[in-house]
Amino acid sequence: MTPYPVLLALAAVGVSWCISGLALLGIRRVWPSAVLVVFAGLATLAGAVLEATGGSEASRLAFIIGGALLAPLALTAYPVLAWRHPLDFVSLVLVGGSGVLAVVSAGSDGVVGAMGLVMGCTLIAHTWWKIEHARDRDRRALTWMALAGSLAGMTGFTIGFMQLGTVGEVTASLALSTVAPALYVGVRRPEVVDVRGLVVRFVVFVTAAVGYIALFMALESLLEILGNRVPHASTLAVVGVVAATTFHPLQVVLRAVVDELLFGARPDPLGAATQVVGHIGDDPVLALRAIREALVLPYSALRLDGKIVAESGVEVTHTRTLPLALGADRAGELALGLRPGDLTLSAGDHRVLSLVAPLLAQTLRARALADELRESRGQAVTAIEEERRRLRRDLHDGLGPRLSGIAFTSDAVRNTLRKDPSGAEDLLRTLRQETVNAIEDIRGLVYAMRPPALDELGLVTALRQQAQALRAPDGTPLRVELRAGRLQALPAAVEVAAYRIVVEALTNAARHSTSTTATVSLTLGEEALEIEVTDDGSTGAPWRAGAGMDSMGERAAELGGTLSAESTSKGGRVYAVLPISP
């Protein structure tokens, strides 16, 4: 009678296969294998139920049908049934025929064991061949199946070797329950983790474990032969410690061998770092290419604020990112594609990247500054072109016609001077007035470019003069308190921007609020000029962006500064910071 813990574990296998098979039925291309998986699970579950109720012969037949016929056929047909290919057809015939013979000869353990050996060898060979010739999507699915099948097979072999009894049978059964879920993951979510990396680690671990066990058994047998008796437990403990010293080195050596077989020889970290550093310059693509070639990586990319600014290679599913220090306001990172079979970057890779990451960060910073410089230059060119367009429009539409009128009036004076002196005198008066108006237009154009008061009086005195002329809508003068320490010579652009911002803010205070007093504060720091304009009036509602506010904001932005404006119940406030170029 099979112990109940084992029956529960077998029932869990049946449930796992049934659920996974039903989930696979939703994927059209794998439905033949999915149907076989469902029926294999049902047969296993039925065998566990029959065994629990005392039907040993029926339960044995159900287990053989599920485990020796339906399950191997499901694995042979996974992920797609390609029976038209000669090798696929032969594999299906061998597995199916062996399964049928095992079912027919259910009472003979020898026949069932022989047929199981044939099916196992056929499955291994067929799966290996399909992995080599399948498309990428099917290859990953088959790799998941191979990993789960190998895990279940090695678990069963280890349990048999250790002779654990009921505990071993339960463990082996639970290992079998992972095969069907692996089939589902292989076709639905194969990229959830790089299965090739898991396979490599599994192979390395199993090989090292087998080597350790073989060494331990050899030492134990040698001591038994030499001492003509079974070694004492303490002796075996020492032998185990001696054999264990080879386990980790063997894993390292095996991993290096597998790496070299799959990817070629890995570079020395210091040499790789030297090679990469030599290629880091203004073009980050060259640096990324050097990183890929030095570390044998399939893909590398630089991201700035979440956007790719440079990349090299072909992007892969599994990547790792390393942050790059660019300051508080910028976020940069280096994205690296993992090699096939790797789950993470190696310690040597991290040593190389720790050396080159600061240089890459400098490259990103330089690129960001260059982009900002190009943007600033573009804004300056646009502003200059807009100013030229305004001057052309003012000259063409205003000053040009006025000067043409002056020319026509002077011709009229010449024609009437002898015949009508009084009329000529009237024309001369008109000519003088037109000339005065033209002069005012010219002054207006000059004032629009740079207020003459700045050159004649300086910034502080020019602001005081302008403030004296401000009146509220009812004619009440606006009292302005100007606070400014000693302002050294400012750059012309900063001086003009400060003058325009202060005048516009005071004009808004006089026109649109109930203020009677205003305060202007100019503070010169080491790197910027701070401007603050406040008044004691209120508009009764939050300020809305208009031409005046837009103009102030544009003047601050042209210099790379900032401006904020707000209205509260206590009055209005305009605050601007204008950087001072060195």
Image: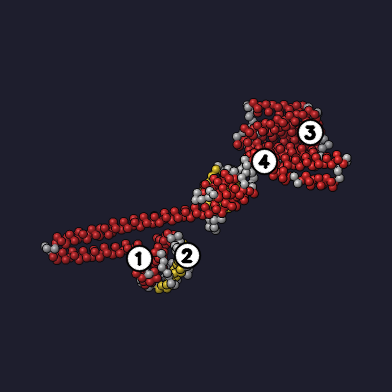
Q: Position of residue 48 (x, y in %)?
A: 77, 37
Instruction: Identify the residue position indicated by label 2 in the image.
Output: 527
Badge 3 or badge 1: first in the primary sequence: 3
Q: Which mark is residue 257?
A: 4
Q: Examine the image and state in which quarter residue 101 appears.
A: top right
Give, as a three-letter code, the residue at label 1: Pro
Under circle 3, the secondary element is: helix
Q: Position of residue 458 (x, y in %)?
A: 37, 69
Image position of 426 with respect to 280: above or below: below
Q: Position of residue 119 (x, y in %)?
A: 72, 30
Q: CA distance from mark 1 to mark 4?
A: 78 Å
Residue at 34% in and 62% down:
448
Q: CA distance from mark 3 to mark 4?
A: 47 Å
Crowdedness of circle 1 by 10 Å Cα count: few (<14), some, many (20+)?
some
Under circle 4, the secondary element is: helix
Badge 1 or badge 4: first in the primary sequence: 4
Badge 3 or badge 2: first in the primary sequence: 3
Under circle 2, the secondary element is: loop
Instruction: Identify the residue position indicated by label 1 in the image.
Output: 451
Nearer the observer, disc 1 or disc 4? 4
Residue at 79% in and 42% down:
216
559 left or right, relative to 57: left
The answer to whether marks 3 and 4 mark residues whose Cβ atoms lie closer than 8 Å is: no
